[in-house]
Amino acid sequence: MADTIADLLGISRVIPVVTLDDAAHALPLADALLAGGIGIAEITLRTAAALRAIEVLARERPGFCVGGGTCRNAGDLRSLAGAGAAFAVSPGSTPALVAAARQSALPWLPGAATVSEMMSLEAEGYTVLKVFPASLAGGIELLRAVAPVLPALRFCPTGGISPRNVAGFLAEPNVACVGGSWIAPADLLRHGAWDEVTRNAAAAVAAAG
């Protein structure tokens, strides 16, 4: 599972985290991101349109890797798998969610904010973890502190990542990628500002080096 999620996250070092209010925005979103050099996105399960958007992308843009975020329970995992998501992302982890993920074929990126949570997930076999909320949990300083004591772990920090600090996060050796909402924020989607999304994606790719 960890190797599979690592391969998926290797598609881009910056992963857009997107909240869609309208499933009709899914295809132009993917096209805008691809034009900017990013072939992956996490669609959060925060709106009624999310699963439909994932279904559309999985069917109509097979070359685009779409995952589902804000996955909090076994039902969310089943819904994402049924929608055709390529992976699932959780803000945290619970024993019940870990057990459900073990029974699911869907690659899962579990979230952690403390060293104890990181150690617990490593004991379950997960070596690629989401750190959320990254900035509030300690940011770059946290990642540097855990590097020598948890050397097998790699991270995808999300929460508080922006153009201002993305390069600093990505410079840390234990950071596989970052997730961020600034590339395709809700206001740009509502106004159909796809060229702006493309510019944001291209700038993020350039920042990742």
Image (spheres, rainbow, N blue to C red):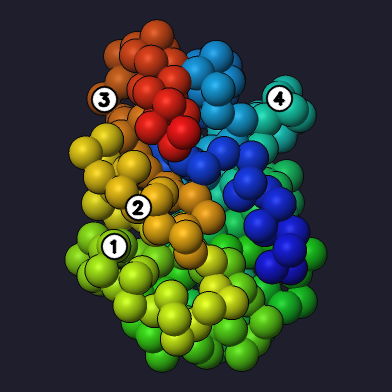
Q: Three-letter amino acid code at disc 1?
A: Ile
Going by the image, does 3 lie left or right of 126?
right
**Lower sequence index among marks 2 and 3:** 2
Question: For the point 58% across and 84% down, which residue is it?
Answer: 122
Q: Three-letter amino acid code at disc 2?
A: Phe
**Lower sequence index among marks 4 and 1:** 4
Crowd around label 2: few <14 · some 14–19 · many ≥20 (10 Å): many
* Residues at marks 2 and 3, CA–CA distance in whole angstroms: 25 Å
* Residues at marks 2 and 4, CA–CA distance in whole angstroms: 30 Å
Q: Please name the residue that numbered disc 3 is placed on.
A: 187
Q: Three-letter amino acid code at disc 3?
A: Asp
Tag nearer the camera, 4 or 1: 1
Residue 191 image point, x, y percent: 30, 14
Q: Please name the residue that numbered disc 2 is placed on.
A: 169
Tag nearer the camera, 2 or 4: 2
Q: Circles 2 and 4: CB distance less than 8 Å? A: no
Asked whether 184 or 6 is in front, the reply is 6
Q: Which mark is residue 140?
A: 1
Residue 200 image point, x, y percent: 36, 22
Going by the image, does 70 lie left or right of 181?
right
Q: Please name the residue that numbered disc 4 is placed on.
A: 61
Question: For the point 26% across and 25% down, which residue is it?
Answer: 187
